Every structure is written in structure tokens, then in C-alpha cells.
Image (cartoon, rainbow, N blue to C red):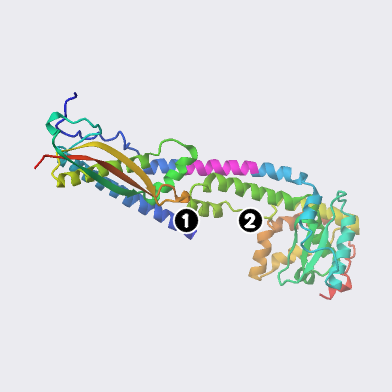
Amino acid sequence: MIDLIIFVTLLAIGFGFGTLAERRHYRSIRRRERDYGHLLVLTGMNLPPAYINHDSELVKGNVVVSTDYFKVVAAGLKQLIGGRLGMYESLLDRGRREAILRMQTEAAARGAVAVVNMKFETSRLSGNAKRGLGAVEVLAYGTALMPPR
Amino acid sequence: MTQWPSHNPQPSEGINNPRRSALGEFAVLALGIAVGAALLAGLLALLAGWLAPYIPFSWEERATRAFASDSAADSEAETALRRLGNRLAADAELPEEIRPRFHLIESPMANAFATFGGHIVVTSELVRQVSSENALSMVVAHEIAHVAKRHPIATLTRTAVFQLVWTTVVGGGNADIAGITGRAGHVTGLSFNRDMERAADRAALATLHRHYGHARGANEFFKHMAERRDETEWQSFFASHPATQERIAAIDEATDGARERPLTPLPPALEDL
């Protein structure tokens, strides 16, 4: 009986704080995306003629995001019958956008005007088999173009 | 050469991070899975329970050979019990391959149970509390009937199948869920249900009639249990033997109208316990 109470409490905490954290994170993400709108991020390798002589440097941004207890349990149940895991989708979406923003922050610190050839890397941290997805690291890296001195 | 954009696009919401009610989805899932798993496990367990008695009795015997062999009885009392048990078994119309074995164990709790391999255990306290051989015979014949009808193996199979299916379906994904639901799905093993008890009672009464010619004194033990004020013993007895009042009534009905027949006294070795 006590086990059940602890379990439900953990679920409630996970759900409550998890939802709160997610909303706050999204608000911050949208705000910064607006702020960094001018710092172009592209995945191609083509350079416009104007940037041919620009300096280039590697920039990267990485973030580790984790699920909350509620998500893990709910996803575990969902995996029984299959289908889309919506809760993990939003988690990874946040991770990717955050990684891009951090990369842009580093690029802006170096005075870059654009980042080209951007790539993603996602790897799973912690999270053993029993507990499902524990934490995920998303890495975004690319070539920053700075105007020559 | 494509046009170089001047600005990053603002990502559209709701495409990669869909709006959904996590709590609602979870509630529906949890309920649905719990009900589904319970139904499936219950169905399979019932089926297994019906098929279990077809497991050969010799397999049960082989499996329990290590536990309490038939060799030297611990005391005169155990020998007397064995003799009584074998006499009753002869009158119980048992199938050929079923041979019950009797054991007397020292215990402050009055109880008797039948387990695998035809092993029947009676506690010394139970023998102390009965005043006639008829009462003891009712208990022993009742346990013999459980063995004859293969109730132990049926109960175990039902329990095992239920727990197996339940934990596989529900507890596989998450260690915490497995821990909790494991406990929820746990059915106390080896507790016979009411139908089994009633069937065993009927068979036991028939055995007593064949052996003594009457069934008087049969429910002395059960009446005694029902009257006891001692909490722990009363509770433990009632936990493993449901519907005692019912059974007393049924036995009374069976002995109704029997003339005043004398009760057989306990053999001296058991009387002295």
C-alpha cells in the first residue's frame, strides 16, 4: 500500500514539475529564437559570393535533457500497445532547438554572421533498460562565418 | 544559386511537439491495460486450473520425494495417525495411483492441510483439541478428499499462471510498476476456494459413513474453532478455511436423523498428546 502511495506521489511530482519546466523552457526557446533570428543557420555547404573571404570556425551547442518520472511510466505503458510517444517527441524537439540556440550563442560571441553546414548528433545518456529513456544529449555543430578583420 | 535568406524562420509549433493531454492519455492507458491484463490472466489461470488435474499424480510424488519421506515415524502418535489415515484412505474410494501420506508435526496452532504428492500434515494441537476419533477422522478424510480431487496442483497452477501472465503483461516495462503490480496480482497460493472445500466435505462425510456407519461427531472440531475466543488461532484458521459456518451447517444436515451412535475414542497414542 505504501508503495502505491509513493508511486502516485512520484507520478504527481513528475507530472506537475515536468509540465511546468516544459512550458517555461518553450517560452525561453521562442524568445531566444526571435533574438537570434538574424544569425542564419543553414545545413547546406553553399556560400554566397559575399562570404567567400569570411573566416570560419567550428561552433557547437549541446544540451542534455531528461524525462520526468511521469513521462517514463506513461511511455512504458504506451510501449505495450505501440504508437507515437508524444511525450518523448516534445522532449527531443526542445533538445534540438536548445542545441541550435546554444550554437548560435557561441557563434554570436565570436561575431559570426551565419553558421553553415550544421549537423545534429543525438546520443542517449543514463537510462538503463528498466527505466526507459533517461537522458538524451543533443549536439548541434557547424561552421561559423565571421567577417574578416 | 538559391537566394540567401535574411532571417531564420520561426519554427511552427505543434508539428514536432504535438499538443496532447498527457494525463488523459495516461489514465486511459493505465485503466485499459490493467483491465485487459486482469481478464487475460484470469482466463488463462482458470483454464490452467481445469487442466491441471490431468498432470499425473506420480509427477507430484516424484517432485516431493525429498520432502518428508515415508520412513520411520517420529513417534507413536505419528504411527497411530498414519494407521488411522490409511484406514480412512481405504474407505475413501481413491483412484488407484493416489496414495496419501500422513505427517504429524508439533505446533501450537491447530491446523491440517493437504499439499503436493499426497502429503497430508496434521498439527499436534489439532489432535489435542478433538475428543473423539470421529472428529479427527473428519479432518483427515477431508484432507484425503482434497488430495483425491487434485486440489493442490489445481490451485498452484492457477496461481502460477495468473502471476506469470500478469507480470509479463503489466510489469515488463518498468521496475517500479512491476514491484507494485506484482504485489497486487499476488494470490495466496494453496488456499482452496469454497467449492473445493464443499466438495471435500461431501466426500469426507461419505468416507466417514463407509468407515463408521455414521457421521456423528464430525464437526466437533469446526464448532470448537467457531467458538474460540483466541484471536490469532481463530483468524489463522478462518483465513485458510473459509465458510466454516456453512460447512458446520452442511455437516449437521448430513448427520441429521442419525440414531445415537457411539463415538469412537481416540487411539491411546494420540489421546496422550
Cβ–Cβ under 8 Å for marks 2 and 1:
no
Quadrant housing residue B47: top right
Q: Is residue B21 at all visible to an observer of this figure?
A: no
Q: Is residue B4 above or below residue B255?
A: above
**What residue is shown at x 87% (from left), y 53% (from top)?**
B92
Determine if marks 2 and 1 fall on one subunit.
Answer: no
**What residue is shown at x 59% (from left), y 41% (from top)?**
B40
Q: Is residue B36 magenta?
A: yes
The percent position of residue B233, horizontal first and vertical second, equals 67, 68
What's the amino acid at mark 2? Thr
The percent position of residue B226, horizontal first and vertical second, equals 70, 64
Q: In this view, does B85 lie above or below B108?
A: above
Nearest to the observer: residue B242 or residue B167: B167
The dot on residue B188 is 2
- Which quadrant would the N terminus of chain B be assigned to in this image? top left
The dot on residue A4 is 1
The dot on residue A78 is none
**What residue is shown at x 40% (from left), y 40% (from top)?**
B25
The answer to whether residue B235 is left or right of residue A86 is right
Q: What kind of element bears circle 2?
A: loop
Residue range in magenta is B30-44
Q: How far apart are marks 2 and 1 (CA)?
A: 20 Å
How many marks on residues? Answer: 2
Q: Does the magenta stretch include residue B153?
A: no
Residue found at the very far bottom of the displayed protein:
B272
The secondary structure that most of the magenta stretch takes on is helix
